[in-house]
Image (cartoon, grey):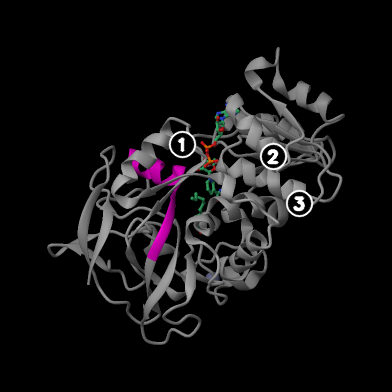
Amino acid sequence: MDTKAAVAYKAGEPLKIETVQLEAPKAGEVLVEIKATGVCHTDAYTLSGADPEGLFPAILGHEGAGIVVEVGADVKSVKPGDHVIPLYTPECRNCEYCLSGKTNLCQAIRSTQGKGVMPDGTSRFSIGGEPILHYMGTSTFSNYTVLPEIAVAKIREDAPFEKVCLIGCGVTTGIGAVINTAKVEPGANVVVFGLGGIGLNVIQAARMVGANMIVGVDLNPSKRALAEKLGMTHFVNPSEVEGDIVPYLVDLTKGGADYSFECIGNPKVMRQALECCHKGWGVSVIIGVAGAGQEISTRPFQLVTGRVWKGTAFGGAKGRTDVPKIVDWYMDGKINIDDLVSKILPIDDINQAFDLMHRGEVIRSVVTF
Ligand code: NAD
Ligand code: DAO
Ligand code: ZN
């Protein structure tokens, strides 16, 4: 079939709207009509050329929602008409990682996904017979996309696509980091570095689990109002703090954060996030993805004296199991996604969504087909 898609031909160049040929789903695969997709920093990171694993030409996009149109042989868990959210972290429920009960990093299709192809080693997308690569196993910047069955979460049918698409990345990552990775308990003091799409979801999850202080740290004062609406109790702008921000935050939290979250991707801030944690038990979670080749550092004594450094991908969420529950939380009014969707644009204007993101003018732009 033919499908409309935004194609990334080359690093650093705008996406091009094209008619792309898409092969039917093979065994264990599903064809999904994407209705809406968020535009996330990770797409921009890959498009910029800074991502060492970025491959071109490809169809980017990993924060989508849509409807199953067709299923290949042996597909049992979804059927045409089901509403789904694509998963860049699949859940096969059968590999060593899934069965460990210790991680969400299913490895069933990891090697082919990283190469931009489907599990049989080939791409379903092409133009004029030349293959176009998949991206993160999802390629949601295409009106129709093919995914492995294990990489779709079935969701309820009354959930609006242009909102719940954010559960495909930002919402689940931030909320999962609090609930699954850090396991923040009621009364805890939390410090969140970076109040973008990820940090705001950390904040609303911290409020949901009953955290006491929820301190937000951001250089951009325009982030303050929405963060407060979502539960932030104290705002700190590092550019207004005299001297080192670490002792300032330790003082503010009366001994240090029980939990801190780095939601920027800056190794210097990652160090601050660890070192502002409480001696003896503070846990710091790295969510931000740093540039290729960057390294973190601290004095080992920070860890000897009881602080813990952790990281999380997709908030530690097992997609097929957890994503439908998060959709329910949104539909039940327990979490706010509406305020995170700053702009809705048609796919033809997708490059404008990237511009808005680079200018820091949106939390998320959502593109619809
Ligand atoms: P964003 O750009 O919307 O938000 C980052 C925020 O950090 C902005 O508000 C910015 O003003 C602030 N900031 C920048 N530098 C700062 C500094 N030095 N001190 C304080 N504040 C600073 O980004 P986002 O969409 O929220 O994503 C955040 C990070 O999370 C990115 O690195 C992204 O790649 C990563 N991410 C990780 C996962 C995962 O599974 N681990 C998933 C999605 C995104
Ligand atoms: O190696 O098993 C693996 C999976 C690695 C992918 C984890 C994704 C990390 C977050 C990247 C940003 C997501 C938009
Ligand atoms: Zn698995």
Q: Is residue 224 left or right of residue 357?
A: right
Q: Dot 1, crowdedness within 10 Å: few (<14), some or many (≥20)? A: some
Q: Quadrant of residue 278?
A: top right
What SS does tag 2 mark? helix
Q: Specify the amino acid type for callout 2.
A: Lys
What SS does tag 3 mark? helix
Q: Earlier in the sequence, mark 2 or mark 3?
A: 3
Q: Is residue 244 left or right of residue 357?
A: right
Q: Is residue 252 above or below residue 45?
A: above
Indicate which quadrant contains ligand 3.
bottom right
Which residue is labeled 3 in the image? 208
Is 258 within the magenta?
no
Is 49 within the magenta?
yes
Q: Is residue 23 left or right of residue 86?
A: left
Q: Given this view, does label 3 or label 1 mark the residue nearer the observer?
A: 3
Q: Quadrant of residue 256?
A: top right
Q: Is residue 361 above or below residue 117?
A: above
The residue stretch that appears in magenta: 34-50
Q: Measured from the top left, where is residue 103 in percent x and y?
A: 63, 62
Q: Specify the amino acid type for callout 1.
A: Gly
Which labelled disc corresponds to residue 291?
1
Q: Dot 2, crowdedness within 10 Å: few (<14), some or many (≥20)? A: some
Which residue is labeled 2 in the image? 229
